[in-house]
Amino acid sequence: MPTTLIITPTPVLHEDPCSGNCYKIRLTAALLNQPLERRQYDILSGETRTPEFLEQVNANGRIPVLQIGDKFLPESNAACFYLADGSALIPQDRFTRADMLRWMFFEQYNHEPNVATLRFWLSIVGEDRLSEMQRAQIPAKRAAGEEALSLMDRHLATRDWFVGTRASLADVALYAYTSVCEEGGFSLADRPNLRAWLSRVETLPDFEPWSDAQV
Ligand SMILES: N[C@@H](CCC(=O)N[C@@H](CS)C(=O)NCC(=O)O)C(=O)O
């Protein structure tokens, strides 16, 4: 993977390792051989909701946040874009670059709020600890997550990567939570194109798996 110039000082990733939104940024950095410092928070115990965090890191009370010097950049896909700007992970062709953004918006609107949220509720928080309101949302999130995964599988029937002819940030953004969708009760058994694409992403040079994506 051709790389951009290494960013200095080393960016700091404010993160919780259980979060796929954070993993996306670690994976982008790994593919670019960009070192990152990591500062960890426990979202379950409210560490991103303290007055200090809200004032100094992200007024929106969430990780990931990429810190570059004294500037703070929340939103995972914005942080991936910052790291990859000028690299082969962002297509040069104008339409393909916009199409990459299309899939990154799809990831945030159709995929992550359903596939990632069900994983978080069912595998991390635990079904018995969900509120009534959360429990009531499960069927709708299940249906919308299934729809997003099926759409992705159909899209990949005739192509190796989400846009263009090589891996881009669209693949990185969609890889994270798709790779653990079974933890949210989704199945890839009938989605062979998605399974093949996950394996393709995993063979990219410098690919780092979720568990030890440390650069
Ligand atoms: N759209 C944001 C989503 C950020 C987000 O929802 N972060 C979650 C973890 S994945 C979080 O910090 N939750 C803790 C909380 O809301 O208190 C992104 O892509 O970065």
Image (cartoon, grey):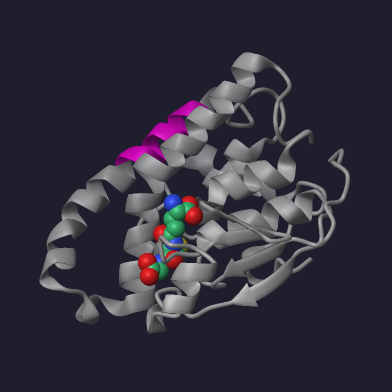
Q: Please report the residue visible at 64 percent of the width from the left and 41 percent of the height from the top.
A: 81
Dominant secondary-structure state across the stretch colored magenta = helix
* Horizontal and vertical percent position of residue 128: 21, 81
Q: Nearer the viewer, residue 57 or 132?
A: 57
Residue 206 drawn at (x, y percent)? 81, 54
Residue at image point 69% right, 61% down: 70
List x then y, in percent, for residue 209: 67, 63
Residue 92 visible in image: yes
Q: Which residues are magenta?
A: 147-155
Foreground residue among 192 and 3: 3
Relative depth, front residue between 7 and 124: 7
Name the image quarter holding the C terminus: bottom right
Q: Is residue 189 left or right of residue 156?
A: left
- Count of numbered tags: 0
Q: Residue at x 32, y 61 (%)?
A: 118
Residue 148 lies in the magenta stretch: yes
Write down which quadrant ligand 1 falls in: bottom left
Q: Is residue 122 above or below residue 70?
A: below
